[in-house]
Image: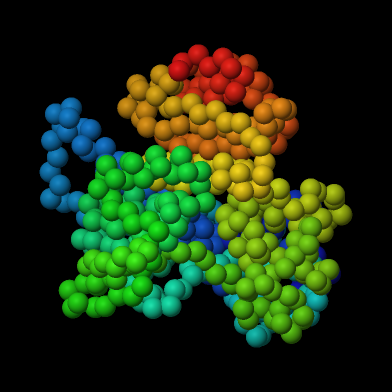
Amino acid sequence: MSENTYDLIVIGAGPGGYVAAIRASQLGLKTVVIEKDNPGGVCLNWGCIPSKSLISQAQKYSYLDDLKKMGVEFNMDNFRYTNVYKKSRIAATKLSKGVGFLLKKNAIDLIKGTGKITGTNEVIVDNDKTYNAKNILIATGSRPRIIKGFEFDEIDILSSTGALSLETLPKSILILGAGAIGVEFAYILNSFGVEVHLVEMMDQILPLEDEETAAVVAKSFKRKKIKMYTSTMAERYENTGDGYRVFLKEGKTESNLTVKKILVAVGRTPNSEELGLEELGIKTDRGFIEVGDYYQTSIPSIFAIGDVINSPLLAHVASKEGEIAVEFMAGHQPEKKIDPMTIPGATYCEPQVASFGLTEKKATDQGITFGKYVFPYRGAGKSVAIDESEGLVKILFNPETKEILGAHIVGKDATELIHEILLAKKAELLPEDIATTIHAHPTLAEAVMEAARGIEGWAIHV
């Protein structure tokens, strides 16, 4: 095999691409990764990781009020948000270098540059050097979606990347979009004293989440004085010279408000341009690459995963898709496309939100008969002991078979707790199996156990 010939070329070193490359190497495939930026992709460098660093620091900052109640006094004269920003960049840089180390450890070549597919088994980098491989995997990810009239300048009209780049905070901000990204930034900025206006065109914040869990977050945000506008459109804005006046419309009611900056967080656009897809006849739909059961495109040697295909735009989904694709390339028989009912979603505001499977609305819309049980966090002793009793655990199930149809948790550490129920679902266990498993006391996980017991009719602490 010549120097520029491989078993697999991966275009993109995000959580889909680098995980796929490592798995391919484990399976004996000679692999090269082409990446124009730093290893780790958007998620690690300008998404999941730095945002979670900011959230962690925002949470610690919000604890100052609790400490004051204990009599602790603070001098805030030297507080600078730039230190918060720098800490988030340190985390991102450290993990990006870690991905580079993992690629090297697994004997994977990493080439910096922009790849374009010029044949069924050929990729050219920066219109210069050509590489060949038995298979090609596209893992180029996505970028913030642009809304007409609210184009980014990354100074005052921000994308999520611009928001993560802030070294000083504005006095006020309007966030367009109350999905996971918008809600997380609302929590971060509010925690550090920014006046936050959160605008959502759907009838609830976190519109993809269960109505009851989203309501808990909305109640918490209201208490934090985050102003929320649901069923509302932002039509346009004008520069006042000292900020931006944004014009809103809720039904027939029009209003406006003035803020210092605007953050647009209304989804993402796949990075499928300039890859050579059109020349090869590979089909896309609204920019998303069309793929089959094992993430093959219409050309059997070319695969695509992650945000560039029409599946949930989540890092963990991209990673799993990459694993499935390369296992198929290596001659294994992996599971086919991920079952969407087993994909966990997570929102890292406080209180956290986590879920998988059907919501009540989805079940009703699909004509699926379901039962449900809701256990309040306050029924778990630890939640009261640590003063984190806001939240609930909801499990939807088939009334006849007790099969788990979905689960929704809102509250402290919800994003960690969801996996016990998800594992039960994946393993085809029943609520009874969770209910009869001894859970350590006191733990928040006892709320999961109690919810399962509730389905069986014998919850204890409610």
Q: How many marks?
A: 0
Horizontally, residue 293 falls left or right of residue 408, namely right
Q: Find residue 20 and report its horizontal and vertical position in percent.
A: 69, 56
Q: Nearer the viewer, residue 105 or 143?
A: 143
User: Considering the image in quadrants, where does the N terminus appear?
Assistant: bottom right
Residue 291 image-quadrant placement: bottom right
Q: Find residue 82 and report its horizontal and vertical position in percent.
A: 27, 58
Residue 304 image-quadrant placement: bottom right
Q: Find residue 439 and report its horizontal and vertical position in percent.
A: 55, 19
- Residue at 66% x, 47% y is 366
Horizontally, residue 195 falls left or right of residue 361, namely left
Q: Nearer the viewer, residue 157 or 41?
A: 157
Furthest toward the right, the residue is: 331
Furthest toward the front, the residue is: 252
Residue 22 image-quadrant placement: bottom right
Q: Nearer the viewer, residue 109 or 442?
A: 442
Instruction: Tell me which colouring the rendered structure shows.
Output: rainbow
- Residue at 39% x, 78% y is 149
Horizontally, residue 462 falls left or right of residue 122, namely left
Q: Find residue 209 and report its horizontal and vertical position in percent.
A: 51, 47
User: Considering the image in quadrants, where does the C terminus appear?
Assistant: top left
Residue 319 lies, with reference to residue 360, above or below; the image says below
Residue 428 lies, with reference to residue 171, above or below; the image says above
- Residue at 59% x, 65% y is 141
Q: Is there any visible trace of residue 358 in the rendered image?
A: yes
Q: Is there any visible trace of residue 259 in the rendered image?
A: no
- Residue at 80% x, 71% y is 298
Residue 351 lies, with reference to residue 195, above or below; the image says above
